[in-house]
Image (tube, rainbow, N blue to C red):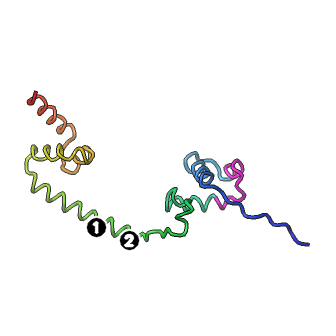
Amino acid sequence: MKKNRQQYSRYSKEIKLEAIRRVIEEEQPVQQVISELGIRHRDNVYEWIKKYKKLGPAAFDSSLKNSIKPIEKSQVEQQLEELKVEVEALKTYLEILLQGEEDKFKAIQALEGQYPVEILCNVLDVPKNEFFEYIHRQDTLNN
């Protein structure tokens, strides 16, 4: 006797992301999530979580399905290391270039439209409150 096999179910991106959200953010049991969302197998949810952790929500975009190649961890680590070296070199250059506090304040003021002030202050080793005091003094002198 031949068994009637059910066809594979396909789930929308929304269902997949909802299942992932419930399991990860709300810490709901996988069994509860699959029951409530009508997902046939719990293994689906575990696979979706794995993909999501690797590629984010884009993992479930059908147009990207076959074109995404996960970046090798070693490539990412190498790029990160190169960026760290570059940042340190730029910090050293800025320290040489900007000797006085006022030079640093002026540099932050010039760049604050392009970058967050907090990051600029951190890079130039300037307390944020001192920068804002400098701005206040400048406003007072100009008025």
Can residue 43 be found in the magenta stretch?
yes
Q: Position of residue 23 (x, y in %)?
A: 60, 50
Badge 1 marks a residue whose secondary structure is helix
Q: Is residue 109 left or right of residue 142?
A: right
Name the foreground residue: 60 vs 38.
Answer: 60
Q: Position of residue 91 (x, y in %)?
A: 18, 57
Name the foreground residue: 115 vs 42.
Answer: 115
Residue type at numbered disc 1: Glu
The magenta stretch spans which residues?
Answer: 31-44
Q: Position of residue 92 (x, y in %)?
A: 15, 59
- Mark 2 = which residue? 75
Name the foreground residue: 13 vs 98.
Answer: 13
Badge 2: how crowded within 10 Å, few (<14), some, or many (20+)? Answer: few
**Residue 103 marker:** none
Badge 2 marks a residue whose secondary structure is helix
Task: Residue at 10% x, 44% y: name it.
Answer: 101
Task: Residue at 63% x, 52% y: name it.
Answer: 15
**Residue 82 marker:** 1
Q: Position of residue 84 (x, y in %)?
A: 27, 62
* Main secondary structure type of the part rendered in magenta: helix
- The quarter of the rendered structure image containing the C terminus is top left
Task: Residue at 70% x, 47% y: name it.
Answer: 36
Task: Residue at 14% x, 55% y: name it.
Answer: 94
Above-or-below relation of 75 to 92? below
Can residue 67 be found in the magenta stretch?
no
Above-or-below relation of 40 to 101? below
Residue type at numbered disc 2: Gln
User: Which mark is first along the chain, 1 or 2?
Assistant: 2
